[in-house]
Image (cartoon, grey):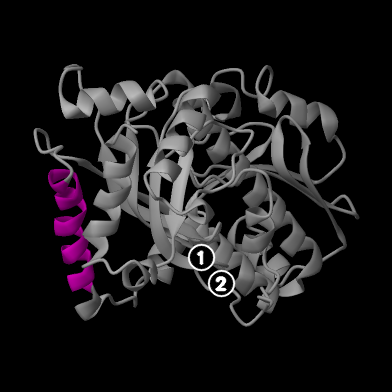
Amino acid sequence: MFLIYVEPSFSLLFKRGKYRSFVPLADEETDDSVREREEKRREKERYLTTAIGFCIKHDSAFQSHFLNAICDIPKTRPRPQIDVLAEPYRWGDLVLISQNRDFVCVVECKVNANLQEWQNPESQGFEKNGYGGFILSKFKTPRIIRYIVLGWKEILNLPKGRLEYAQKSWDDLAHNFPHKSRLAADLYDCFSALGVATFLLKKTQTMKIGDNAKFFGDALTLLPAAQIEAGLDEMPPKFDCGGSQVEGWWHFGVNIKRTKNVKTIRGKLQQFVTPKKGHPIGWYGYGWEREKGAYFSFWLYCASKNAQEKVKTRLIQNGVNLDYIMPETDEDSFVEVRAPFKVIQKQGLSGDRSWFSRILKATMKAT
């Protein structure tokens, strides 16, 4: 037995949350998948906002940088103590209040999201019916009350009103970032891992694949060949890949497409697996998790627990090692077969394609 030690970080905190997802995406976009994707995006945005607030509160270098770059509070200005509030009200993602009541900054953060009418200072009546009205009713004494839109890509025509307005980009935050601070540097990595474009581009600027790209080319050939070997050669597969640096996983593989012709080999496989609506029959390829490394992976998207049990029983009867069939979850009735790369030598197979086609044939072979 051995232990894997993982250094605590903002990224790890997000990964340990309940919003991690590793199941390959549905083959067809459904209302549920759209809602799920939007909810995940909102949770990432909320998490990043909270992480920013945490760093402002606990890291003086980052606080100075944020106040100057985003809030337009000069570094030469005396710095009072600041109260930092993350989503304290529905009209503010991040609220910074100087304890001497010199200023209040309300920051609306956007990560690949739309700026709604009630959040947009261009909107008519913003200081009456929009966020501006709520802010003005809440804060009456500070000398400066500033509303800042951070991360919205379209240029705003900012009005002159009772509030002061500013529009800032993630580039503004990334410029002259205080990397020497360990806490701020960890936040920078978290921005990159969660897909904030500016930070992701800077983080990947010097990455090189080089000669390792040949393995990608090999996979492009052998993965479809496994279906041909199993007799599913009437239509090409669809490649499906994804991953998350912050959550610590990736997958790269191909889908087993559905068919309308139930008399074909594919059609009979489809009837047996009874895939969930919006999903292909299955998916197979390579997976990786930070704490487990890389492995072979084969998914069958059963729509019910009954179909799941039938598929598992057939796989076992056709010689698939029970230890490679992953435990059931409460979330769905899918079946995943996962094996280490050493299974190739252990089972005397000629290569990766043979393992994928063997699992596929085991699913197709009636006992």
Q: Is residue 226 within the magenta segment?
A: yes
Along the line of sight, the residue nearer the viewer: 244 or 98: 244
- Pointer 2: what residue? 177
Q: Amino acid at mark 1?
A: Ala
- Please give left or right for residue 19 compared with residue 229 in the image: right
Q: Quadrant of residue 232?
A: top left
The residue under the point 51% across, 31% down is: 309
What percent of the width, then of the height, locates residue 301?
41, 32
What percent of the width, then of the height, locates residue 340?
43, 66
Q: Secondary structure at mark 2?
A: loop
Dominant secondary structure (helix, strand or loop) of the stretch shown in magenta: helix
Tag 2: Cα neighbours inside 10 Å, few (<14), some, or many (≥20)?
Answer: some
Q: Which residues are magenta?
A: 213-229
Along the line of sight, the residue nearer the viewer: 321 or 227: 321
Would residue 327 be seen by someone viewing this image from the given angle?
A: yes
The residue under the point 28% across, 51% down is: 358
- Pointer 1: what residue? 174
Q: Is residue 196 within the magenta segment?
A: no
Would residue 71 be seen by someone viewing this image from the given angle?
A: no
Along the line of sight, the residue nearer the viewer: 134 or 2: 2
What percent of the width, then of the height, locates residue 185?
61, 73
Q: Is residue 351 above or below residue 366?
A: below
Q: Residue furthest right?
A: 100
Tag 1: Cα neighbours inside 10 Å, few (<14), some, or many (≥20)?
Answer: some
Please report contact status of discs 2 and 1: CB closer than 8 Å, yes or no.
yes
Q: Amino acid at mark 2?
A: Phe
Along the line of sight, the residue nearer the viewer: 225 or 75: 225
